């Protein structure tokens, strides 16, 4: 899981592309676990983007990030702080795809 430290609105730890990719990879595992055990574990990325990224059998972390880039405002409007932070920087998301 990606760890962010936010105190009084100040970001103390910058995200790296590898951290964003790791969060997407964790969402792939979470998605598969949720489907196989009828779970409801929350995702780091917006659930719509996780579902879009996993549409095909080959669904992968980079597909989730690509879905996020197409519809970035959905993630930025999320009620989850971690999700909003993942969507904050478009350039970092693009670099994470190339990671």
Image: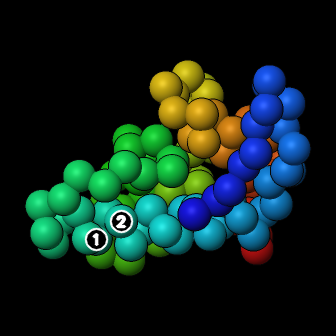
Image quadrant containing the N terminus: bottom right
Q: Secondary structure at mark 2?
A: helix
Please name the residue that numbered disc 2 is placed on: 30
Whether residue 23 is visible here, answered yes or no, is yes
Q: Position of residue 63 (x, y in %)?
A: 51, 62
Q: Which mark is residue 41?
A: none
72 or 4: nearer the eye?
A: 4
Q: Secondary structure at mark 1?
A: helix
Q: Position of residue 26 (x, y in %)?
A: 49, 68
Q: Quadrant of residue 30?
A: bottom left
Q: Is residue 54 above or below residue 43?
A: below
Whether residue 70 is visible here, answered yes or no, is no
Q: Is residue 27 left or right of residue 75?
A: left
Q: Position of residue 7 (x, y in %)?
A: 79, 32
Image quadrant containing the C terminus: bottom right
* Mark 2 surroundings within 10 Å by alpha-carbon count, few (fewer than 14), some (14 through 19), many (20 or more): some
Q: Quadrant of residue 24?
A: bottom right
Q: Is residue 80 above or below residue 38?
A: above
Disc 1 versus disc 2: distance between alpha carbons?
5 Å
Q: Which mark is residue 32?
A: 1
Mark 1 and mark 2 in contact? Answer it, CB < 8 Å.
yes
Q: Residue at x 12, y 61 (%)?
A: 38
68 or 86: nearer the eye?
A: 86
Q: Residue at x 31, y 55 (%)?
A: 41
Q: Position of residue 78 (x, y in %)?
A: 51, 28
């Amino acid at each position: 899981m990606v760890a962010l430290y936010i105190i009084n609105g100040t970001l103390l730890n910058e995200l790296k592309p590898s951290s964003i990719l790791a969060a997407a990879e964790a969402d792939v595992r979470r998605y598969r676990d949720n489907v196989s055990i009828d779970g409801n574990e929350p995702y780091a990325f917006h659930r719509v983007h996780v579902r879009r990224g996993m549409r095909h059998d080959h669904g992968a972390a980079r597909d989730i990030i690509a879905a996020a880039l197409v519809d970035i405002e959905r993630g930025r409007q999320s009620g989850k702080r971690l999700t909003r932070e993942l969507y904050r920087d478009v350039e970092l998301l693009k670099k994470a795809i190339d990671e």
